[in-house]
Amino acid sequence: MSSNLPTIGYIGLGIMGLPMARNLMKAGYPMVVYNRTAEKARPLTDDGATSADSPADAARRVGSEGVLFLNVTDTPDVEQVLFAEGTGVVHGAARGLVVVDHSTIAPIATQGFAQRLAEQGVTLVDAPVSGGDVGAQQGTLSIMCGGEAAAFERVRPMLEVVGKSVVRLGGPGMGQACKACNQVAVVNALLGVCEAAALAKKVGLDVGKMLEVVAGGAGGSWQISNLGPKIATGDHAPGFMVDLVLKDLAIVQDTAERVGLPIAGTGTAQGYFRSVAAHGGGKLGTQAMAQALEQLGGFRFTAADPPTSPEDHA
Ligand code: NAP
C-alpha cells in the first residue's frame, strides 16, 4: 500500500506500545517495528508492518524524513535502545531524524540523551503518557511533551492519533518533569481513597456506598471513581502495576531531591507500595496500596463482607 505519510519506526511493543503502534498503522502510516522479544511484533507484521533486526536497523529504515517512537520500560532501557554499541538507534540514524520517547523515565537523563542525539543531528521529543492500557487502545491518552518546538510540530499529527490531549511544556525533559508531577497527584489521590476506605471500614460504614457518595462531591477523583470500587471489594487485578509505579516514584523522588523539595505525602504512598511489593504484590494493580492499610489497621476489604451498619441489613 503506498502512502504520502512519513514512515514510522516503533521500538517497544508492550502493553502500551503495541496498541499505540496499531492505531498509527490504522491511520495510514507505513510502519517499521522492532521488539526485543521478536514474537511480540507478530500481530503488527501480520498486518503489514516491516520488521527491523535492531534499533539501528529501524532507524536506518525510516530515514531522515521518518519518525522513530520508543516505548520501553525505564531510563537504562532507553539509553540502551538509543546508544548500545553497534545496535543502538544512533548507529543507523540519518541527520534530521526525530525520536519520540513515550517511556516514563528520568527528566535529567532525558536532557542528557537529547544532547547526545543532537550531536548526531537527531532531535528527541520526550512524550510520556497518562491514561493506561485502555487509553492506549482507544487513542485517548494525555501526552506530555518536551523538546524543540519545530520537532514537536512535526510529530504532533502522529501524537494526535494516539492521544486526546497533546501538550508541549517546554524544552527537553519537561514532558518527563510533567509526568513526575502527574504521578505525585495520582498516588496522593489514591492514598486519600485508601485511607477514606480504611476509616469507613473501621467505623462500620458500607465502604462501597461511602465511596459512591464521596465521589460525587469535593472528594471526587479518577482514582476514587475507577479504583475505589476495586478497593472496596479487594479486587487487585492490574491495571497499572505496583512495580511500575515504584519505578516512577523513584524518578519522582530523584527529581524532587535535585530541587530540594520535600514531598512527604508521596513518600508515604511510596512506603505503602514498597510494603505491598515486599509481600509479593509487585504485579498487582496500584489499588493494592489498600493492602498496606489493611495490615496497619488489622482488617480486610472483601466482596463477601456484609455491610456492618445495622440499617443496611434491612
Ligand atoms: P511493558 O508491557 O512491560 O513493555 C515494555 C516494552 O519495552 C517491551 O516491548 C520490552 O521488550 C521493551 N523493553 C524493555 N527494556 C528493553 C530494552 N532494554 N531493550 C529493548 N526493549 C526493551 O510496559 P508498558 O506497560 O508497555 O510500559 C511502557 C512504558 O510506558 C513504561 O515506561 C511505563 O512506565 C509507561 N506507562 C505505562 C502505563 C501502563 O498502564 N502500562 C501507563 C502510562 C505509562 P520485551 O517484549 O522484549 O520485554
Image (spheres, rainbow, N blue to C red):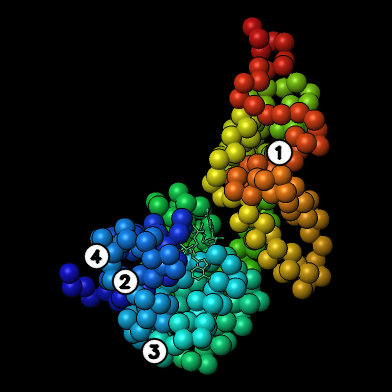
Mark 3 vs mark 1: in front: 1
Kind of element beneath mark 4: loop
Q: Amino acid at mark 2?
A: Ser
Quarter that holds the N terminus: bottom left
Question: Looking at the image, is 267 positioned above or below residue 88?
Answer: above
Which residue sits at x=28%, y=64%?
45
Which residue sits at x=63%, y=32%?
234
| Sequence-first tag of 2 and 1 | 2
| Sequence-first tag of 3 and 1 | 3
Which residue sits at x=45%, y=78%?
99
- Alpha carbon of mark 3 to alpha carbon of mark 1: how far? 50 Å
- Alpha carbon of mark 2 to alpha carbon of mark 3: how far? 19 Å
Query: Mark 2 = which residue?
Result: 51
Question: Looking at the image, is 167 positioned above or below residue 298?
Answer: below
Q: Is residue 23 left or right of residue 219?
A: left
| Mark drawn on residue 94 | 3
Query: Mark 4 = which residue?
Result: 48
Q: Quadrant of residue 293?
A: top right
| Sequence-first tag of 2 and 3 | 2
- Alpha carbon of mark 2 to alpha carbon of mark 1: how far? 43 Å
